[in-house]
Amino acid sequence: MTSRHLVDPELLPLLEFFPDTPVSAANLHELRAMEAPPMPVEDCGVDVEDRSIDGPGGKLNLRVYRPREATDALGCIFHIHGGGFLFGSAKNMEHEHRPLAASLQCVITSVDYRVAPETCFPGNIEDCYAALAWVVANAQTLGVDTGRIGVMGESAGGGLAAALALLARDRGEYGLAFQHLIYPMLDDRTCVGDAHPLTGEFVWAPESNRFGWASLLGHEPGLEGVSPYAAPARAEDLTGLPPTFISTGALDLFLEEDIEYARRLTRAGVPTELHVWPGAFHAFDAMPQAQVASAARLASGNALSRFLARRDSAG
């Protein structure tokens, strides 16, 4: 059954910019070569600095954004880019990060973790953890308030952000103020479960999802024993996680796993805000001219503003 009749009409032009062919081992190199270069972006009064640190697999690159005129310690968004565990870079998010750092008056740090299939789990999450550790250790130099550091990501980056929140909780070294998850990729079992009849037709298809998860895990998805630090939905205990924002589309392949994660978080006593946007497919918010995309971005920005201000208001 096609779900095209359910798509918000304002979002239909966006589909022209996404490949129709699912991602596979045969076309991965070609699709990577087609990734768009960084978009031009205004200065926005935000400085950007590239850092290279020692990571678990060698040198690890980070980008740091900070409002130029800020003098006090600021809240910090630790951002993890999306791309199905296969694509993406911190640099390609500059058009999002500069204006976001300016509007929220916060620091944003973004990490270039190693991608699959060249690096399987746990390489990517350990890269993210090492980068988070560096941010905390260098908070004073960066002008960051360690009480207001939270994680954020979209798609696979959202899954990694959720995994990092679990890992930080369980290792007990760093406390996070929030997790902000945009259509997060949380559950490898979506690849083998009963398929929703109306999700996953656009942008990120079931075939791409299976390839992404298999590339990350080093084996087929859905098997027993998958770590929750790879697939956060596998975590048995969600207590003690930070306040959470989850946003997803009603036509997104990740719809049901995102709703279920939000349900389980609320049952674990975690303050959780969930948005499901009608007529919206994966990555729909890349078209801000559409009303539903604008509404989603506004809700996201408002939640981040509350998260970043929370520790200040609490004294």
Image (cartoon, grey):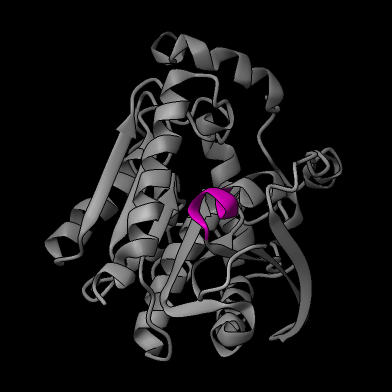
The residue shown at (56%, 61%) is: 79
Front in this rendered view, residue 4 or 270 = 270
Secondary structure of the magenta portion, mostly? helix
The residue shown at (30%, 65%) is: 310
Residue 236 is left or right of residue 307, and the answer is left
Residue 209 location (% of width, % of height): 55, 45
Residue 16 is left or right of residue 168, and the answer is right
Residue 40 is left or right of residue 315, and the answer is right
The residue shown at (64%, 84%) is: 141
Front in this rendered view, residue 71 or 246 = 71
**Magenta region: which residues?**
100-105
Front in this rendered view, residue 204 or 88 = 88
In which quadrant will I find the C terminus?
Answer: bottom left
Residue 25 location (% of width, % of height): 75, 48
In which quadrant will I find the N terminus?
Answer: top left
Q: From the viewer's perspective, is residue 173 above or below residue 244? A: below
Residue 150 location (% of width, % of height): 43, 68
270 falls in the magenta region = no
Q: How many marks?
A: 0
The residue shown at (47%, 31%) is: 200
Residue 82 is left or right of residue 45, and the answer is left
Q: From the viewer's perspective, is residue 83 above or below residue 284? A: below
104 falls in the magenta region = yes
Q: Is residue 225 visible?
A: no
Q: Quadrant of residue 256?
A: top left
Residue 294 location (% of width, % of height): 46, 28
Q: Is residue 64 visible?
A: yes
Q: Quadrant of residue 56?
A: bottom right
Front in this rendered view, residue 218 or 112 = 112
